[in-house]
Image (spheres, coloured by chain):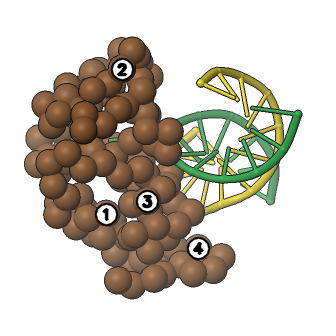
Chain colours: A brown, B green, C yellow
Amino acid sequence: MFLLGILGHKMTNQEQQDFKSQVFYLLSTSNKGDTFTYGELAKHAGAPKHARLVGKILKELPKDTRLPWYRVVNSKQMISFAENSDGYLRQRKLLEDEGWVITGQKLLTPEK
DNA sequence: CTCACGGCTCTCA
DNA sequence: CTGAGAGCCGTGA
């Protein structure tokens, strides 16, 4: 895996492109039931401090994408959407379909 | 150049 | 466990 942006240096377009590709790759190779946090993805994609960028990227995915964007939650294992927003509802449904139990409002718990 | 704003994260109280 | 505060960093006004 290529580590880029090791140290403070603004990401070039090329790097951002690679970063994005990595994120997509990681997601595309994930299996049913997996989940990642934004931070993990960013880290695995080579830019540890870019959790937010991951969010931005996912946000721009086309609605009909086949990528499992919904397997990405924040570091607290919660859905990072405002409760009851449609994004939240969609993600929740998809996760439940993969066997997750979302307790109460947001908490995400493994179904183990 | 600042300012605000994210599908974020950590730390500390 | 909860919440405030500070980092973080690309983007757009």
Tell which tag, 1 or 2, sits nearer the viewer. Answer: 2
Residue at mark 1: chain: A
Tell which tag, 4 or 1, sits nearer the viewer. Answer: 1
Mark 2 or mark 1, which is nearer the start of the sequence?
1
Q: Amino acid at mark 1?
A: Val
Q: CA distance from mark 3 to mark 4?
A: 20 Å
Horizontal side of A26 relative to A103 (left or right) equals left
Residue at 15% from the left image edge and 55% from the top image edge: A31
* Residues behind callouts 1 and 3 on a single chain: yes
Residue designated by label 2: A103
Residue at 15% from the left image edge and 37% from the top image edge: A98
On screen, A32 above or below A25? above
Tell which tag, 3 or 4, sits nearer the viewer. Answer: 3
Residue A110: image quadrant is top left
Residue designated by label 3: A40
Q: Of helix, strand and loop, which one carries label 1?
A: helix
Q: CA distance from mark 4 to mark 1?
A: 18 Å
Mark 4 or mark 2, which is nearer the start of the sequence?
4
**Residue A100 in picture, x, y percent from top left:** 24, 32
* Residues behind callouts 2 and 3 on a single chain: yes
**Residue A29 in picture, x, y percent from top left:** 17, 63
Tell which tag, 2 or 3, sits nearer the viewer. Answer: 2
Residue at mark 2: chain: A
Residue A108 visible to an observer of this rendering = yes
Relative depth, front residue between A103 and C10? A103
